[in-house]
Image: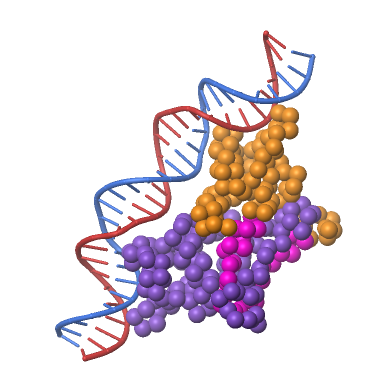
Chain colours: A orange, B purple, C red, D blue
Amino acid sequence: MKHSQAVESLAALAQETRLAIFRRLVRAGPEGESAGSIAAALDIPSPTLSFHLKALEAAGLVDQRRESRNVIYGARYGRMRSLLAYLMKDCCAGHPEICNIDMESCRESPARTSACG
Amino acid sequence: MKHSQAVESLAALAQETRLAIFRRLVRAGPEGESAGSIAAALDIPSPTLSFHLKALEAAGLVDQRRESRNVIYGARYGRMRSLLAYLMKDCCAGHPEICNIDMESCRESPARTSACG
DNA sequence: CGTATATTTCCATTATTATGGAAATATGAA
DNA sequence: TTCATATTTCCATAATAATGGAAATATACG
């Protein structure tokens, strides 16, 4: 990942509403969620939502597809992984224990009944 | 991690110069690096560097200690881990393979001669 | 076609942030 | 105390971003 791309992605996430939107899409998984559903869930006026979704898309963090009258947005997980890896790159100067991220919530979410896979 | 803290941290990182500074400190490990050394390496005027270090510190991403005339800055790895975990929280709706981050560069950096730990 | 629903674009207002020169402060050395 | 080095604060300028109402566009359905 290029430095400028990382800055662009971070800037897209560095905003209360956009971060909430993105995390919602991260939770949603590959199926994604429609703009209207996001707007209703987060109580955001549609012009504001559209503005923020566009920013997330321009940053490469989400993609969109149309399904009938709805536009479905989804997280681009590859881009998210690249961004996180970029932040940790060559980290810790020989102390790998420093960078162990807790990924339990991914493998076994409280919203789901059992472990996935 | 609270939402507002995550936004604050992301905003601190969402700037070309600050991201470069932070990644440099992430690489540096627990020893950290002095302001002057960072300024020289990245060719940043000292008022500008000071401004950005202050922003990173306010966001909780770096800490400082004085050593004689130098002020040594270091990455706060705990905060970084929390931030990354927050982004991935409850991710992927049952597809845990989506969120496997490549951490090889942490365990075996090209800048080092052999694996650490 | 006419109507309803979903989403986006336009735009004016308001607010926040980055930059770096000059000056101030802090520490250590002679 | 006087000087040199390291870092920060002050401040004016310039640039960028967020908000949401009104209007425009896109899709579907009868």
Residue name at image x 37 percent, y 78 percent: B70
Count how many numbered circles sit on residues in the image.
Answer: 0
Quick check: B41 above or below B1? below
Quadrant location of the N terminus of chain B? bottom right
Q: Quadrant of residue A93?
A: bottom right
Residue A92 is inside the magenta segment: yes
Q: Is residue A102 visible?
A: yes
State left or right for residue A108 relative to residue B16.
right
**Is residue B114 shown left or right of residue A51?**
right
Q: Does the magenta stretch mainly form a helix, a strand or a loop?
A: helix
Magenta-drawn stretch contains B84: no
Query: Depth check: A114 or A87 in front?
Result: A87
Q: Splitting the image into 4 quarters, where does residue A68 fall?
A: top right
Chain part drawn in magenta: A80-107
Q: Position of residue A14 (x, y in %)?
A: 53, 52
Residue at 59% over, 34% down: A46
User: Residue B12, how many percent across, how many down?
Assistant: 48, 59
Q: Is residue B45 above or below residue A66?
A: below
User: Image point 55% across, 49% down: which residue?
Assistant: A12
Residue B55 in percent (x, y) is at 44, 62
Quarter of the image that includes the C terminus of chain B: bottom right
Does residue D1 lie above or below B104 as drawn? below
User: Percent position (x, y) of residue B99?
Assistant: 71, 59
Direction from residue A112 to residue B88 in the image, left or right = left
Residue A16 visible to the viewer: no
